[in-house]
């Protein structure tokens, strides 16, 4: 069980852990322009190459193929926690490493233009990948293709923004996405975790931590009390719809019936899809038994009457999502009272890039979006950036990664 949790939460460690290994020699006689040699020449896939060697897959990618490989770059693999490297370097985990890496390899050669014409891809792992195009951005599952069409004699390489993890269930997606800790705690308190690990399929509208922060103060605490479990279940099952419904499928509907039997209303305004009064802000997080869509407000069913207006929750900042990002990232925060708020982006040298927000904000939850432009409106380059939030006497800061 520990290994399963580790593999999902720290999946990128499987690649980064090989930094602790000595470099593996490449066999002589391999084609100079095969996928392995092409990745080696690029100079940004060292971690992936060493991981392929450790998993016994490098020779596969030297064979005639053809193959399409989705490769994590070294800069992202290096941004990985180190506390569990020893556990993952255990030879007993080689099978899990191989399972993850084969999920990045597709039989056949697909250029970026060809990828844009398909919806799914088979992998050597046996589980399919989902392909979507949004605002001219090519997505493989939840990863952005940041560099495409590195051609080799036996296939093609595309660089991606994050590791592709073989699908777990919807609870795994919620747990390891990093922005749903409140939802996860609520699911456990409502004793719904095991149900959502079932066969399904399920479509889950998942409120972020900042979305829960928009509830009146004391509401969540009240719902989490053991005596209110039935009411909590009513709220949470209002966020789950039977079936595996993509964002595009939902956009073509007017209503949905939730697991609690009540109706959800669907409206579309431009590119925004609303579920009741909540916007879908990140879509199509694929799971083995369904899909998760991120929403910016908690859905409260008519049968729940205890949500009363009150003061909002204490100050807190939610994890930015998506992170890494391209073309934009959302940062959420919650205010206990009306405060002057400034949200500023800096580069790693401490130079100010832009000001996202600077003014008086009302109590409750808020979100700001950065579109990777400086204060003059110019696009900025890939790399690590820092954000700082000041709200009265409160402050918070963190790191975000832009991958173009």
Image (cartoon, rainbow, N blue to C red):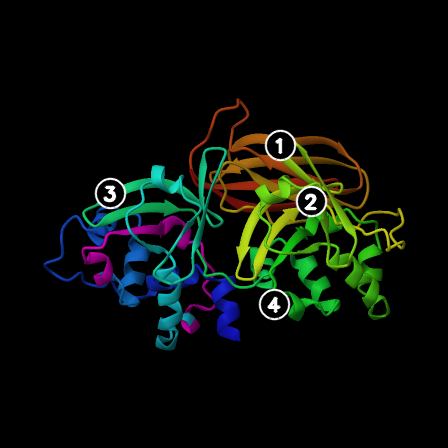
Q: Is residue 333 shown in magenta?
A: no
Find disc 1 in the rendering and name its residue.
356
Assess disc 1: are there few (<14), some (14-19) or many (≥20) residues with their C-alpha within 10 Å of its C-alpha. Answer: some
Q: Is residue 67 shown in magenta?
A: yes
Discs 3, 2 touching: Cβ within 8 Å: no
Give the Cα separation between the discs numbered 3 and 2.
Answer: 40 Å
Discs 3, 4 touching: Cβ within 8 Å: no
Tell which tag, 3 or 1, sits nearer the viewer: 3
**Residue 191 at x, y = what percent?**
72, 70
**Residue 348 at x, y = what percent?**
47, 40
**Residue 83 at x, y = what percent?**
48, 67
Find disc 2 in the rendering and name its residue.
296
**Residue 18 at x, y = what percent?**
33, 63
Question: Start and end of the magenta stretch?
Answer: 59-87
Nearer-the-camera pick, 101 or 84: 101
Tell which tag, 4 or 2, sits nearer the viewer: 4
Q: Earlier in the sequence, mark 2 or mark 1?
A: 2
Residue 74 shows in this picture: yes
Find disc 3 in the rendering and name its residue.
151
Find disc 4 in the rendering and name its residue.
197
Nearer-the-camera pick, 140 or 314: 140
Assess disc 2: are there few (<14), some (14-19) or many (≥20) residues with their C-alpha within 10 Å of its C-alpha. Answer: many
Give the Cα separation between the discs numbered 3 and 1.
Answer: 39 Å
Q: Residue at x 34, y 45 (%)?
A: 158
> Judging from the image, what secondary structure is the residue with disc 4 in?
loop
Nearer-the-camera pick, 291 or 226: 291
Tell which tag, 3 or 4, sits nearer the viewer: 4
């Amino acid at each position: 069980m520990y290994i399963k949790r580790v593999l999902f939460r720290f999946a990128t460690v499987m690649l980064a852990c090989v930094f602790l290994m000595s470099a593996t020699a490449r066999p002589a006689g391999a084609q100079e322009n095969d996928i392995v040699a092409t990745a080696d020449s690029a100079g940004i896939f060292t971690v992936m190459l060493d991981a392929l060697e450790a998993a016994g897959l490098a020779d596969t990618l030297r064979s005639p193929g053809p193959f399409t490989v989705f490769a994590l770059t070294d800069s992202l693999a290096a941004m990985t926690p180190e506390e569990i490297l020893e556990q993952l370097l255990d030879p007993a985990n080689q099978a899990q490493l191989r399972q993850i890496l084969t999920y990045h390899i597709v039989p056949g050669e697909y250029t970026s233009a060809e990828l844009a014409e398909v919806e799914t891809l088979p992998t050597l792992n046996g589980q399919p990948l989902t392909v979507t195009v949004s605002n001219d951005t090519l997505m493989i599952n939840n990863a952005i293709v940041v560099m495409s069409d590195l051609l080799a004699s036996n296939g093609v390489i595309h660089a991606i923004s994050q590791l592709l993890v073989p699908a777990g269930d919807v609870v795994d997606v919620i747990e390891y996405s990093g922005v749903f800790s409140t939802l996860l705690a609520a699911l456990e308190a409502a004793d719904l975790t095991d149900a959502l690990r079932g066969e399904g399929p399920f479509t889950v509208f998942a409120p972020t931590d900042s979305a829960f922060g928009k509830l009146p103060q004391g509401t969540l605490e009240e719902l989490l009390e053991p005596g209110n479990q039935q009411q909590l279940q009513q709220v949470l099952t209002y966020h789950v719809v039977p079936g595996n419904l993509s964002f595009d499928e939902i956009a073509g509907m007017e209503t949905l019936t939730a697991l609690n039997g009540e109706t959800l209303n669907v409206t579309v305004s431009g590119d925004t899809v609303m579920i009741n009064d909540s916007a879908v802000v990140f879509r199509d997080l694929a799971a083995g038994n369904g899909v998760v869509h991120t929403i910016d407000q908690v859905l409260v069913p008519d049968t729940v009457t205890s949500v009363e207006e009150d003061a909002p929750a204490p100050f807190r900042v939610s994890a930015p999502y998506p992170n890494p990002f391209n073309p934009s990232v959302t940062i959420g925060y919650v205010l206990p009272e009306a405060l002057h708020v400034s949200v500023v982006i800096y580069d790693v040298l401490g130079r100010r890039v832009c000001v996202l927000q600077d003014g008086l904000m009302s109590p409750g939850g808020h979100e700001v979006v950065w579109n990777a432009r400086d204060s003059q409106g110019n696009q900025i380059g890939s790399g690590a950036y820092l954000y700082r939030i000041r709200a009265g006497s409160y402050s918070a800061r963190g790191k975000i990664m832009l991958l173009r």
